[in-house]
Image: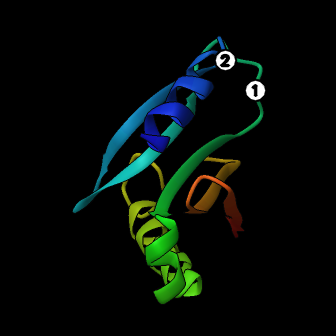
Amino acid sequence: MLKYVYSLFFSLSSQYYVYGEFPALQGFADIFVEKLVVSSAKCEAIIELKYLNKQKARGLNIEKLKEDGISQLKKYIKDKRLENRENLKRFVIVFEGFEKYYIYEIY
């Protein structure tokens, strides 16, 4: 559900095209935000979302989910459609229920 909310939010802009489940190599990036040809935007983004409900969050390590997301992003950006993009921002967002979230920008 969170993926669709984020996709909807990004799609409200006339500067970007938003892909949900963007196919990249052997997987799917949760969200890819691509600037349109006529866009004046300066960057694009690829986002990997991780979600834990409150009960599962107690027993699982948020750092582990973050590392899993980073690993996935590193694989996805090797895709020929993504690897040479200038100003491609990379984010892993980990949700702990609907109250807490952690945003990590990956360089």
Query: Considering the numbered disc 1 on the image, is that residue within a helix, a strand or a loop?
Result: loop
Q: Which mark is residue 41?
A: 1
**Residue closer to the observer: 68 or 17:** 68
**Does 105 sit left or right of 75 as displayed?**
right
Q: Residue drawn 56% across and 20% down?
A: 11
Q: Which mark is residue 74?
A: none
**Residue closer to the observer: 79 or 96:** 96
Q: Which residue was labeled with disc 2?
A: 15
Instruction: Specify the amino acid type for callout 2.
Output: Gln
Is any part of residue 84 visible from this angle?
A: no
Looking at marks 2 and 1 on the same chain, the residue that comes earlier in the sequence is marked by 2
Q: Position of residue 104 (x, y in %)?
A: 69, 67
**Residue closer to the observer: 96 or 9:** 96
Query: Considering the numbered disc 2 on the image, is that residue within a helix, a strand or a loop?
Result: loop
Q: Residue drawn 36% across and 57% down?
A: 79
Q: Position of residue 106 (x, y in %)?
A: 67, 69
* Image quarter in which the N terminus is found: top left
* Image quarter in which the C terminus is found: bottom right
**Residue closer to the observer: 70 or 9:** 9
Instruction: Specify the amino acid type for callout 1.
Output: Ala
**Does 5 sit left or right of 10 as displayed?**
left
User: Is the Cβ of the residue at disc 2 closer than 8 Å to that at disc 1?
Assistant: yes
**Does 28 sit left or right of 32 as displayed?**
left
